[in-house]
Image: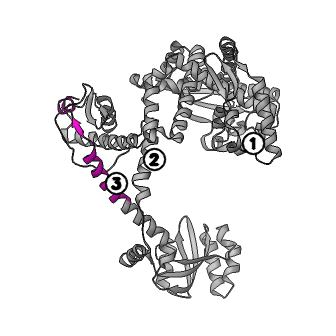
Amino acid sequence: MRLIVVFTLAILIINSCSTGPDSVATVGNLQVTADELKSQLSRRFPDKENYQDVAITEKNQMLDQLILRKLRLNEAYEQGIDKDNTIVNDYEKRKGQMLSNRYFEKVVIDNLFPETLIRSEFEKTKTEVKARHVLISFKSAPRSLNSRSEEEAKKLAEKIVTQARSGEKKLYQLALLYSDDSTVKQNQGDLGYITWGQMVDAFQEKAFSLPVGEISDPVLSEFGYHIIKVEDTRPNAKFNEEDYPNQVENIKRRLYRSKADTARTLWDNHMEKLKEEKNYTFKDENIKKFLEDNKKLKDAGQLNGDNITPEDRKLELLTWKNGALTVDELLTGYGDKIARFHSHLTDSSSLYTDAGRLGSHHMVVQAAEEEGIMAEKDIKEQLDNFMEYSLLRVIEKQEVRDKVSYTEDELKDYYTQHKEEFVIPEQIEIWEIYTTDKNMADKAYRLAKMGKDFQGLASSFSEDSYFAKKGGYIGYKSKTARAAVSKAAFEAGENKLIEPVKYRKGWAVVKTGKKSPQTYKSLEKSRSVIVTKIKQQKSRDREKEWELELRDKYKIDINEDLLKSL
């Protein structure tokens, strides 16, 4: 996940080249690498294999976006924001998630689904099939509204197959008669063209193996029994051989969903083996002491994270080869939700469960690091980007948003100078009877013209249930607020009854009330909007000012030869 913050472009400051061989620019203590700029250019020019014919002015603009990012990062590092506890903890949490996920992928997913299988799944997407089906569900199937048993569903499905193959009825007719697919009334069982991976395994395995025109035997999936007919096949126009690297993760996820139980068993077995190899051990005496100390704090009404002693925080609850889980790490693991876990700190079972879960996670992260996963290019890039995003978020808040303020006089001045932004236009009061039946609209109009109570008529005739409950009262509306209804109301004027007006997919009988002249929202009612606008403008001004400060503070060197050659 590459997060690029784009700010207002400024003129590049170009000094004599002193960058590294793979750096397009040096910004203070940081580098803009050729790969970073290529990544930016690839999004701007997705169809280009190289960028040598891209105008140098465009390259400079793209590079300047990265330079601005690096300038801000320099300031963040200089202020020591990367050492902030919140930043460090968030980074470690993200790192742990990424390393443990990749470790699981290597240990389980890659063993369950080898490269040959992934490739085979990708190749199957070269073809599309046009399929029609009838679904016969049973009471235990997901989202089923049917009370029949699975055996009853199978018998009905077999009957439908016989009718379809005999030509007694077309499959679309049988779908309308019997199918439990919620979309059958709209599509008559026609699923259109499908590609491999869109449907559940049992369905797609049969559909992609059926000859065109043949009707399948009943196919059981988790949703019920399917009777399938393939009506056409064609090459998948969206298939792109070069897209394979981008599809690998999606294919793995889909395959994993079909083998989740098997994957969980493999993972559990691996964890048992890893715990044995690492001598994963609970420190029972330390846990006992921690629980006793917490119970004393609870009895005194003082149990919270702040009152746990430094001595207890250092206690090791779990150990394994080259690793341990301390009380302090457990409390950090609870994060800002620690209050929800206070009861766990005095309950032996809960504490063992929490410590075991977090300790296992830390042990897996350590195993992942020992496997060299941290050095993998995509892991490193994503973690670097996460850290940079975190630093930018904090430094921008400190240097821009926190330095923007406003006075009451500025609010008043803005309101006075931009009063046209707060106009409340001329409005007219409207009652409406809406119906899609022109005859009903004419009838309602005639009754209203005879003096029948309009609100009562609206309650009886209007198909707009929301306003019907209000006696047809719409409220005060401007000339454009309700399209043809508003237009007719303004043309008629105050206290008029208007014959049916074509509106939306029907007709509206309209009655008008009083007009209200154009006026202005008060300063108080406009305050929040004005505050937002002032802050936005001042933030833009502060961003430009800060940018100049950074450009003056940090040296920028551009490798012009490399920039031109990309």
Residue 165 position, x and y percent, is 67, 24
Task: Say few, some or many: other residues with alpha carbon within 10 Å of mark 1 (under 14 / 14 to 19 / 20 or more).
Answer: some
Residue 133 position, x and y percent, is 64, 31
Residue 434 position, x and y percent, is 61, 71
Question: In this orientation, does residue 105 appear?
Answer: no
Query: Sequence order check: which comes first, mark 3 or mark 2?
Result: 2
Residue at 39%, 23% in the rendered image: 242
Element assignment for label 2: helix
CA separation in Å, label 3 and label 2: 14 Å
Residue at 70%, 33% in the rendered image: 312
The quarter of the picture where the C terminus appears is: top left
Element assignment for label 1: helix
Q: Which residues are magenta?
A: 539-566
C-beta proximity under 8 Å, tags 3 and 1:
no
Query: Sequence order check: which comes first, mark 2 or mark 1?
Result: 1
Residue 382 position, x and y percent, is 45, 31
Residue that mark 3 sits on? 543
Query: Sequence order check: which comes first, mark 3 or mark 1?
Result: 1
Residue that mark 1 sits on? 342
Q: How many marks?
A: 3
CA separation in Å, label 2 and label 1: 30 Å
Say whether residue 390 is magenta.
no
Residue type pointed to by label 3: Glu
Residue type pointed to by label 2: Val
- Above or below 524: residue 172: above
Question: Which label is found at residue 394?
Answer: 2
Frontmost residue, 161 versus 59: 59
Q: Quadrant of residue 468?
A: bottom right
Question: Which label is found at residue 22?
Answer: none
Residue type pointed to by label 1: His
The quarter of the picture where the N terminus appears is: top left
Frontmost residue, 357 versus 144: 357
